[in-house]
Image (cartoon, rainbow, N blue to C red):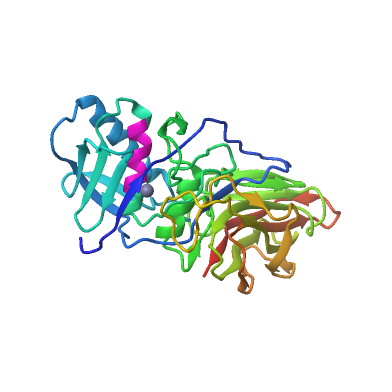
Amino acid sequence: MTRRYATTTRVLGVVSLGATLLVGGAVPNANAYSPFVNTCSDPTIHWEFSGTNWTSTKKGWVRDSFNTIDNALDFDGSSLARATEDSGVEVSLVDFTDNTYGKANCSQGTIKLDESKTVDKFYWKVARHEMLHLMGAEHGGDADSKDGENPPTMSTCINWTDFRDANDLSRDDGAYLMFLHSTLAERQIHANVGFERGFSNWGANEGEVIEHDAGGSGGPKHIGFKAESSANSSYVYQTARVWTGSSSKFFRGTFHAKSQASDLTSNAKIAIYYRELVEATPANGCDYRGMITNPNDPTLASGAWTALVGTNLTSVGTSWTALQSNWQGLSGADGYEIQVRVYGKATENDGTVRQIRFDTARSDLQ
Ligand SMILES: [Zn+2]
């Protein structure tokens, strides 16, 4: 390893239910993080236990933690990142004398965890937090994932007892790994963009979603969407929080659509909406990138969504068609909620509504 990054974490989470809505619903699912990458960037990390004071129980908790990372899926269903136990990054226990929970260092190839803790979820959350640092992740906020999986793994400046009880990769973590390591061009700010985890992380407005396990545009899975209203008001959506720290960022929408039969009239479009996030004050003293000082407990500048950019409603045939908006910039706010909306409707000649198919839906960030 030639890259260097050291970090201290005092972290994490709260229990709640994640919901997958198949029909209707006004609850926007969100993921969030700062769109910054540290000097660590390897999606495949080999690691080993090192040093003294390990018990088989603590080793089991750390293995269980790292094993959740390969649950994040790229647009085609492949794993985005993997932590493999053999030899490499040395994971050791340290008797920290301050309130440090763990540290990760790229150039030294080390992860250090506080040996004084004897609770499973401490090791689940802190070990994953440090490993994600080694994979390039920076700190985000404690309320970044609004689908009931807060605080996500990369939040900091919270007590470990506030971690979620479950040992799993939150959807926010999955979105961040997508941003860091997707094989698609550009950076993707959403999770499950290829619907390889079904409709997880998405919501539907004025329409019904049907999950399909084969025939997608990239990976096998995709969705069908039966509009309940017009093609201009029936859509699926996903929200991501992006902490830009006032730096300017550009967004565009991209997805694939197709008609399921040649005798249908099928139209689709994509739009990106946003609303501004305001950081809490004062600064909380934790380490964030990009002039971010306290993303914990943020507020919205306004409850209203503003249209940023999109495509016209476009007729699609029975082959997958890529639809993409122009890039559009945003700047000046601490951060944004970016909502991608994929619209569409398929009808027979007599007006009967059928499914239109969607895949690889997301907002890119530049
Ligand atoms: Zn950290």
Depth check: give the residue in front, 185 or 284.
284
What is the magenta range?
122-131
In which quarter of the view is residue 102 placed? Answer: top left
Q: Is residue 338 visible?
A: no
- 343 horizontally vs 217: left or right: right
The residue drawn where x is 47% and y is 35% is 13
Q: Residue furthest right?
A: 350
Q: Residue furthest front?
A: 282
User: Which residue is drawn at the image coordinates 44% and 56% (left, top)?
Assistant: 288
The location of residue 153, given as percent across then percent down, is: 43, 43
- The image quadrant of residue 114 is top left
In the rendered image, residue 348 lying in the magenta stretch gets the answer no
Q: From the viewer's perspective, is residue 283 above or below residue 142?
A: below
Residue 59, relative to residue 343: is it above or below?
A: above
Q: Position of residue 191 (x, y in %)?
A: 52, 51
**Quadrant assignment for the N terminus:** bottom left
Tell me where residue 257 appears, x and y as whole percent: 63, 61
254 lies above or below 161: below
Q: Nearer the viewer, residue 121 or 100?
A: 100
Which of 324/148 is in front?
148
Residue projecting furthest to the left: 52
Question: x%, y% of residue 93?
Answer: 21, 36
Q: Per the image, is 123 magenta?
A: yes
> Of helix, strand and loop, which mostly describes the magenta segment?
helix
